Image (cartoon, helix red, strand yellow):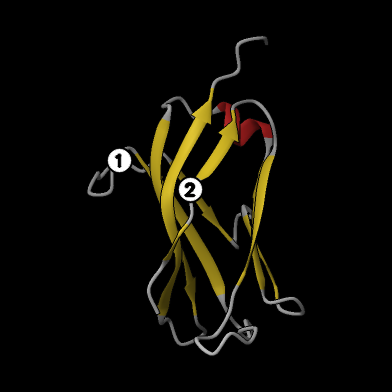
């Protein structure tokens, strides 16, 4: 299954979140039992610089098996730490067997906090 393109806009200095419903190819909700998730923000796709990492382990990504969703959960401190106006990102789900599945990919646009 190919990653679904999905661009994000994040306000610097504010909590940010998006929820994605994960579907099977036939349109039914995917069983996410045993899955973890990981997400990277980079200045450009082939960059070795990791600007931000979100995982289910660090609670920046949350998996809800009852609703087949994966949610991004960025705090005010997370968004304040971002300093470029654009990043490339993707989110991968990883099965209990270690098999990755790219869920989504796109561009993160950061709107800068001016009043602080």
Work out how far the residue at label 1 is from the one at label 2, CA to CA, in angstroms.
Answer: 20 Å
Residue found farthest to the front: 27
Q: Is residue 65 left or right of residue 91?
A: right
Mark 2 surroundings: few (<14), some (14-19) or many (≥20) residues within 10 A = some
Q: Are marks 1 and 2 in contact (CB under 8 Å)?
A: no
Closer to the camera in the image, 82 or 89: 89
> Is 37 rendered above or below residue 105?
below
Measured as percent of width and height from the top left, residue 33 is found at 64, 84
Asked whether residue 90 is in view, the answer is no
Q: Quadrant of the N terminus?
A: bottom left
Asked whether residue 103 is in view, the answer is yes
Q: Nearer the viewer, mark 1 or mark 2?
A: 2
Q: Residue at x 59, y 61 (%)?
A: 57
Q: Residue at x 52, y 84 (%)?
A: 96
Which mark is on residue 15? none
Residue found farthest to the top: 115
- Mark 1 lies on residue: 49
Measured as percent of width and height from the top left, residue 29 is found at 65, 83
Secondary structure at badge 1 equals: loop
Q: Quadrant of the C terminus?
A: top right
Measured as percent of width and height from the top left, residue 24 is found at 54, 85
Residue 41 image-quadrant placement: top left
Secondary structure at badge 2 equals: loop
- Give whichever of discs 1 and 2 has the lower sequence position: 2
Q: Residue at x 28, y 48 (%)?
A: 45
> Is 49 rendered above or below residue 62?
above
> Is 99 rendered above or below residue 59?
below
- Mark 2 lies on residue: 7
Q: Residue at x 74, y 76 (%)?
A: 67
Mark 1 surroundings: few (<14), some (14-19) or many (≥20) residues within 10 A = few
Q: Is residue 66 left or right of residue 7?
A: right
């Amino acid at each position: 299954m190919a990653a679904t393109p999905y661009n994000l806009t994040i306000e610097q200095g504010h909590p940010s979140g998006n929820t994605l419903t994960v579907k099977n190819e036939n349109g039914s909700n995917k069983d996410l039992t045993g899955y973890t998730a990981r997400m990277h923000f980079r200045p450009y796709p082939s960059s070795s610089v990791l600007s931000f990492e979100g995982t289910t382990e660090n609670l920046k990504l949350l998996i809800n098996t009852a609703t087949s969703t994966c949610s991004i959960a960025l705090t005010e401190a997370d968004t304040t730490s971002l300093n470029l106006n654009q990043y490339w990102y993707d989110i991968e789900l990883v099965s209990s067997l270690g098999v990755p599945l790219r869920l989504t990919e796109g561009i993160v646009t950061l709107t800068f906090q001016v009043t602080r």
